[in-house]
Amino acid sequence: MLELYQAEDCPYSGNVREKLTELGASYVTHNPRTADGQLRNQQTLDEMENIGGEDQIPFLVDHRRGTEIYESDDIIEYLDEHYD
């Protein structure tokens, strides 16, 4: 399962969503905060920080491969490598 911690108003998150859609990958989104840092869901933010250690979006968790990745370019490269 793929989980994407992101913000709807974040262009970097949008790039990752576009790649996931292009690849036809199923994924779950979580919106812990807005791109400018306004809190939307404390529990989701806490989960993201517990998994990855940082308050940074986008953040992808690939449970199937046991991988967690920050940075949209790194996420897109990872998706191209493993899901294309």
Image: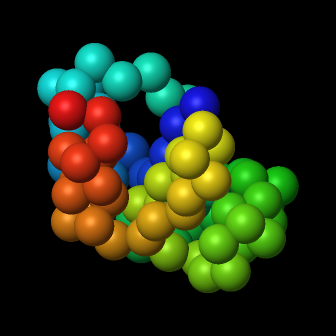
Relative to the observer, which residue lies in front, 64 or 75?
Answer: 64
Q: Relative to 2, does residue 70 appear above or below in the rendering?
A: below
Relative to the observer, which residue lies in front, 21 or 83?
Answer: 83
In which quadrant will I find the N terminus? top right
Residue 5: in sight, yes or no? no
Is 9 left or right of 59, judged from the image as shown? left
Q: Residue at x 23, y 48 (%)?
A: 81
Question: Picture coordinates of residue 61 (x, y %)?
Answer: 56, 51
Q: Relative to 65, does residue 21 appear above or below in the rendering?
A: above
Is 40 left or right of 26, judged from the image as shown? right
Question: Picture coordinates of residue 6 (x, y %)?
Answer: 46, 53
Kindly give the residue lying farthest to the bottom in the view shown. Answer: 54
Q: Residue at x 63, y 43 (%)?
A: 63
Residue 51: in sight, yes or no? yes
Indicate the colouring scheme.
rainbow
In which quadrant will I find the C terminus? top left
